Image: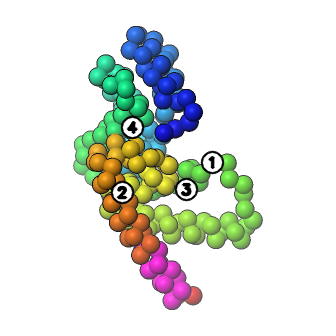
Amino acid sequence: MGSGGRPAADQQLIERARAGDGSAFSQLVQQHQQLAFRTAYLILGDTAEAEDAAQEAFLKAYHALARFRSDAPFRPWLLEIVANQARNQRRAAGRRAQLALRAADLSDGELAPGPELAVLQHEQRQRLLRAVESLREAERLAVAGRYFLNLSEAELAALLGCPRGTVKSRLARALDRLRQRLLESSAVELARG
C-alpha cells in the first residue's frame, strides 16, 4: 500500500509522536490531510464540514496514538477515524447531505482540452457524477473511495467499517447499478436528441 517507504516512515513518525515530538505528528497530518479531507467530503458533501471533520479526526487520532498497534498500517486506521467522525458529525446535524463530487478537484495536473472536447468531457463527467450521487450511500462511498480516491480494498474496508469481502461485493453491485444508470441516462439523451 502507498509509495515506497511510506508505511515505515509513518511508523517512525508515530513512534516519535508517541514520545512527545509534536513536529512528528504535524508531518503525519501534512502527509495525510488531503486524503482525510476527501474522505470526510465523500461522507458529508460539504467543504467546511469536511475540513472540520478531518481536523477533529486528527485530534482524535493524536489522542489515540497510544492505542495504535505498531504493526498496523497508519492510513487505514486514520481513515476509519475520519469516516467515523464524519458520520457522527452528519448524524449530529440530523441531515443527509448529497455528495457533490467535483471531478476537477479530484483530478490533478490534467492538460486543458480544446473547447469542444472540454464541453463533452464536462457533460460526461456531470452525467457520471449524477449517476454516482444516485447510488445508495454505502455504494456511493465504495465507488468514490475506490475510483476517485484510489483507496485499496483494505483502506475501503476500514473507511466503510466492513470486511474486505463486503467491499468487493458492494463495489460489484454498485458498478452494475452505475452501468445501468448510465445506460438509462444515455437512452434518455438519445431520445431527446
Q: Mark on residue 168?
A: 2
Residue 120 in percent (x, y) is at: 64, 71
The kind of secondary structure element at disc 3 is helix
Is 119 situated above or below 164? below
Say few, some or many: other residues with alpha carbon within 10 Å of mark 4 (under 14 / 14 to 19 / 20 or more).
Answer: some
**Residues under labels 1 and 3: Cα distance?**
9 Å
Residue on which the image places disc 4: 76
Q: Amino acid at mark 2?
A: Lys
Q: Toward the viewer: 135 or 74?
A: 74
Residue 126 in percent (x, y) is at: 53, 66
Q: Which residues are magenta?
A: 181-191
- Disc 1 or disc 4, which is closer to the eye? 4
**Residues under labels 4 and 2: Cα distance?**
17 Å
- Disc 3 or disc 2, which is closer to the eye? 2
The kind of secondary structure element at disc 4 is helix
Going from the N terminus, do you reach mark 4 or mark 3 first?
4
